[in-house]
Amino acid sequence: MNNISIGNKEVIHFVGIGGIGMSGLAQIMKTMGFKIQGSDLNKNKNTENCKKLGIRILIKHVKKNINNATIIVKSSAILKNNIELKEARKKKLPIYERAEMLANVVAFKKNIIITGSHGKTTTTSLTAKILSETKLDPTIINGGVINSLKNNAKFGKGEWTVLEADESDGSFLKLPINYSVVTNIDNEHLDYYKSYKNLMYTFTKFINKTPPIGKAILCLDNINIKKIIRETTKKNYLTYGFDVKSNYRITNINYGFNTKFDLIIKNPGSKKKIIKNIVLNLIGKHNALNATASIAVCLNLGVKINLIKKALKNFSGVQRRLTKIFTKNKREFYDDYAHHPTEISSVLEGLRQVYLSRHLISVFQPHRYSRIKNLKREFTFSFSKSNKVILCPVYNAGEKKDKIYNQNQFARQIAKNSKVQVIVIKNQIELQNYLRKNLVSDEIIIGMGAGTISKWMHDLKNIL
């Protein structure tokens, strides 16, 4: 599909508008002057943000929701037999995937497309923060709520869009690119890609799509990106990382409640430059990498380094990305979206660099049976920086229960390979009871996962 023609009389109905990506697109299109409405099974923060903009929100999926709709946009999470989609097909209404509609909406802008297995939301947020400090006034569509915006989307009057692209279903290939960032490539979403080979092929295609007038910004620390670089014939890319061969190399790093580092820049055809004393208001090595990707993009767009430094120092974070949610009785409670072994390891390493000797408790809610099946061994080694792991039941995200999966067996394997004590709980009440009885003092407690664990962690504030 190319060049969707949308007139003023069209009513665009979003099926699954409560999703972070769907709500962001809906808000941008509403701000652009389109007539937008949408439905979802439940209210959430995303639907509330849509409502504040004047978007009509319908709770539950029923036929009558699309009575006045002329165009349908569907979330990738919506099944084919959804009642609204069936009714739309009956009425012969045009139905578009979110990525298709998004590609057409941003086709009239210059686009910075940020993707990767991990870190893309934070990298998008950092890039958006820097560019928002300039006169460029970018449009922003992110996969997480940026604290300074209190939203994940903003329509800017400038010519640039900063966009987080979802690699989970290959839809990022549909987006028009000027600059791109690939933060890393990991064994993730193999339920869609079916094989590591297909995953690598798709990312290679994405990187090669970056035009000669733009640049692909690639993390050289990642082994899979290194493989693609060795094989690609295109040369319009720049690299970043701790690797000594990086064009943007992180050095002299110091960890704490903020992260400080220097940057050595060696661009082809240019003299070596050193940027000293970059202060990032985020924790951990992985966030230094995310920040460096955003610095590379913004320097290539001509943003002055003093503006970049100021933005990074004042960055107030992204919701559910190592977010401290409360402190109680000298205990610190954190919430994070980490649901992949690499993400878990990075988050725990970041916390351990700040809280050197404090007792660190990981509350982990596995997300999807298929992910555990594909990455079971990797998961069992990812908690070595914890003192204790509380293993919650699987959040199945619509998948059928895997009868082979055994929570107690999984716990034993984590205990063995991460050399950590593991406690098995069956529900939210058991989590609350365990923490109420067993917390002593001075602990760091972090909830991790992409399901209901965030709510469970927030609910602890009024219970402990």
Image: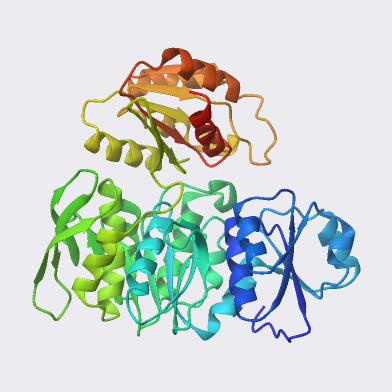
Relative to 339, 275 lies left or right: left
Q: Residue at x 40, y 62 (%)?
A: 125
Q: Position of residue 14 (x, y in %)?
A: 72, 65
Q: Residue at x 50, y 78 (%)?
A: 176
Q: Position of residue 430 (x, y in %)?
A: 57, 18
Q: Quadrant of residue 297?
A: bottom left
Q: Is residue 426 visible?
A: no
Q: Position of residue 206 (x, y in %)?
A: 45, 68
Compared with residue 348, is residue 236 higher up or lower down, i.e. above or below? below
Q: Residue at x 20, y 57 (%)?
A: 279
Q: Quadrant of the N terminus?
A: bottom right
Front position in the image: 383 or 43: 43
Q: Quadrant of residue 2?
A: bottom right
Front position in the image: 420 or 308: 308
Relative to 147, 366 lies left or right: right
Q: Residue at x 59, y 51 (%)?
A: 192
Compared with residue 362, is residue 24 higher up or lower down, i.e. above or below? below
Q: Position of residue 362 (x, y in %)?
A: 41, 28
Q: How is the image coloured?
A: rainbow
Relative to 197, 91 lies left or right: right
Q: Quadrant of residue 392?
A: top right
Front position in the image: 330 or 429: 330
Compared with residue 238, is residue 409 higher up or lower down, i.e. above or below? above
Image label count: 0
Q: Is residue 249 visible?
A: yes
